[in-house]
Amino acid sequence: MNRTLTRLALLSVLMVSFASAAIIYTLTATLTTVVTVPNIIFTTGADTGSIGGTIGTNGTTFTATNVPLQVGANVTIEEAVNLTNTDGGSSHDIIGAEVASEDFGAELNMLSIYVYNGTRYLLISLDGSGAVVYEFSGTLSMPASAEWSIIVEGCYDDGTVSGTTNTITFNIWQ
């Protein structure tokens, strides 16, 4: 009987050892997300309606469907849309601009997009071949509650066919 107890004791120790080895450790993480809207958004400018401009629901997108560039004569749209700092208590920075896409070709003479706060700051420039030659990178500090206009300036080459349409999509980083 002593042998049987010894065997049972050894079997019990063996079972406890296997049970201890089977403990699985888990790590749990919980993420809580918060929706944030940029402090600098697009708002309606004096020329927004005349160029077929619309602003997205949260102010982060702007679309213009009828920007009237001419052939051989430079056109300046002084207030295509505005940039507005919605934070009434703090300044925020524009840190760059980037062309996401554009389909201008050799018919373009030039196209420039500026931000204006009393001084024109070039954001984007395309050359006569439609190639992007400049994208702003730096820091423009926008004071609390400030509103700055976006200026679009450009023209098509002589001989460009009437009714030609092109599109540029760009981002302003903050």
Image: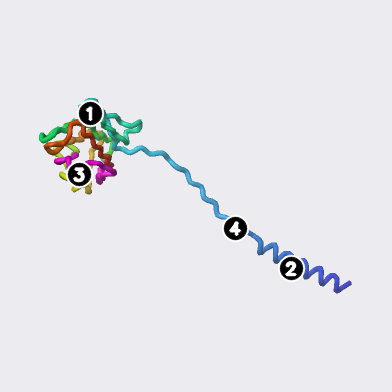
Q: Nearer the viewer, mark 4 or mark 1?
A: 1
Query: Which of the two discs, 2 and 4, labels the residue nearer the N terminus?
Result: 2
- Amino acid carrying label 4: it is Tyr
| Span highlighted in magenta in the image | 92-113
**Residue type indicated by callout 1:** Ile
Judging from the image, what secondary structure is the residue with disc 1 in?
loop
- Residue designated by label 4: 25
The disc label shown at residue 14, or none: 2
Front label number (4 vs 3): 3
Q: Residue 48, located in which quarter of the rendered image?
A: top left
Lower position in the chain sequence, tag 1 or tag 3: 1
Coordinates of residue 131 in the picture (x, y in percent): 20, 47
Q: Is residue 116 left or right of residue 39?
A: left
Which of pointers 4 and 3 lies earlier in the amino acid sequence?
4
Quadrant of the image containing the N terminus: bottom right
Q: Residue at x 59, y 58 (%)?
A: 25
Residue at 81% across / 68% down in the picture? 8
Res. 99 image quadrant: top left
Residue corresponding to mark 1: 51
Q: Is there any visible trace of residue 125 in the rendered image?
A: no
Q: How far, Cα to Cα, is label 2 from label 1?
A: 82 Å
